[in-house]
Amino acid sequence: MRTRPAVIGMLTAIIVFFLGMLIHAQLRTDSSALGSSLLTFAAVAVPGGLLAWWLAGRPRR
């Protein structure tokens, strides 16, 4: 069983990877919609990350 810090590290790496891909795609399209894209990413990634963190830390029955 993985410890909670290991799970947090994996989730952080995944979130940073996709955030980097989002920023890279927005900068390549020369779009001014980077702010709204970041807000959308945060609206999806933060609750999803918290849910995954909570589920990973729950004891199994």
Image: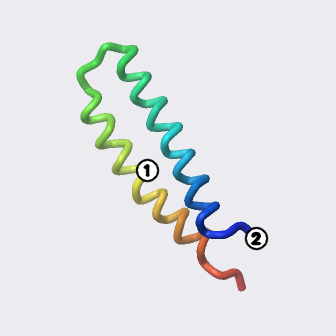
Label 1 amino acid? Ala
**Quadrant (top left, top right, bottom left, bottom right) of the N terminus:** bottom right
Q: Quadrant of residue 58?
A: bottom right
Apparent side of residue 56 relative to residue 42 in the rendered image (left or right): right
- Residue 1 vs residue 5, the one in the foreground: 5
Disc ID at residue 16: none
- Residue 38 vs residue 7, the one in the foreground: 7
Q: Residues within 10 Å of mark 2 (few under 14, many from 20)?
A: few
Label 2 amino acid? Met
Cα–Cα gap, marks 2 and 1:
24 Å
Q: Quadrant of residue 6?
A: bottom right
At 72% across and 85% down in the image, what residue appears? 61
Q: Is residue 28 above or below residue 8?
A: above
**Closer to us: mark 2 or mark 1?**
2
At 36% across and 14% down in the image, what residue appears? 29
At 43% across and 30% down in the image, what residue appears? 22
Q: Residue furthest right?
A: 1
Disc 2 secondary structure class = loop
Disc 1 secondary structure class = helix
Q: Position of residue 47 (x, y in %)?
A: 41, 59
Q: Residues within 10 Å of mark 1 (few under 14, many from 20)?
A: some
Q: Which residue is mark 1?
A: 45
Apparent side of residue 60 relative to residue 50 in the rendered image (left or right): right
Q: Which residue is mark 2?
A: 1
Q: Position of residue 23 (x, y in %)?
A: 39, 28
Q: How is the image coloured?
A: rainbow
Instruction: Mark 2 or mark 1: name the one nearer the start of the chain.
Output: 2
